[in-house]
Image (spheres, grey):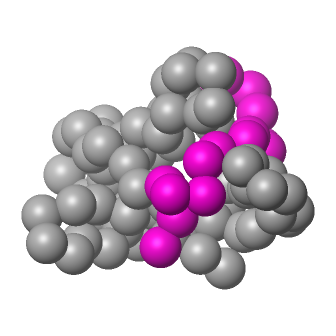
Amino acid sequence: MADLVCDVRPGMASFSRFAIIKDLDSRRHSIQVNADFLTQDNGQSYLPVGVVYRGGDRVLIEFPHESDTGTYRIWVAPSDLR
C-alpha cells in the first residue's frame, strides 16, 4: 500500500468525498470514498492505493474500487506517492 496525492471535493453524502487523481497523461480520475478513508499531511490529501508495478519514471497503481472513468489501474508519477 501507498498513499497517492489527490484533490478532494465534497461527496454525495456528508460522510463521503471525491478523490480526484491525475494520471501520467494528465487525465483526471475521480473515486468516491468515505471521508475517513483519506489522510492529510501538511494540507495535502492522500488516497491509499495498491502498488502493482514500479518502473523508472512511472508507477502502476490500483484503486480500492472502480473510478468514474471505469478504470481500476492507472500509471502515475513516482513523485505523486508517499
Q: Give the residue drawn at x 82%, y 63%.
A: 54
Q: Give the residue drawn at x 63%, y 65%.
A: 49
Query: Closest to the observer: 53 or 62?
Result: 53
The answer, for residue 65, to whether it is visible in the render is: no
Residue 5 place in picture, x, y as percent? 41, 56
Outermost residue, left direction? 43
Outermost residue, front direction? 56
Quarter of the image for residue 76 reads top right
Residue 33 is covered by the magenta coloring? no
Q: Which residues are magenta?
A: 68-82
Q: Is residue 43 left or right of residue 67?
A: left
Residue 36 place in picture, x, y as percent? 32, 73
Query: Closest to the observer: 59 or 74?
Result: 59
Residue 73 is covered by the magenta coloring? yes
In the image, residue 9 above or below residue 59 = above
Quarter of the image for residue 1 reads bottom right
Q: Is residue 52 left or right of residue 13?
A: right
In the image, residue 12 above or below residue 39 = above
Q: Give the residue drawn at x 72%, y 49%.
A: 57
Query: Closest to the observer: 52 or 35?
Result: 52
In the image, residue 28 above or below residue 35 = above
Residue 48 place in picture, x, y as percent? 53, 69
Q: Give the residue drawn at x 50%, y 57%.
A: 79
Outermost residue, bottom direction? 1
Q: Is residue 72 left or right of residue 68?
A: right
Query: Closest to the observer: 60 or 57?
Result: 57
In the rendered picture of this protein, how many numbered marks are placed on residues?
0
The answer, for residue 25, to whether it is visible in the render is: yes
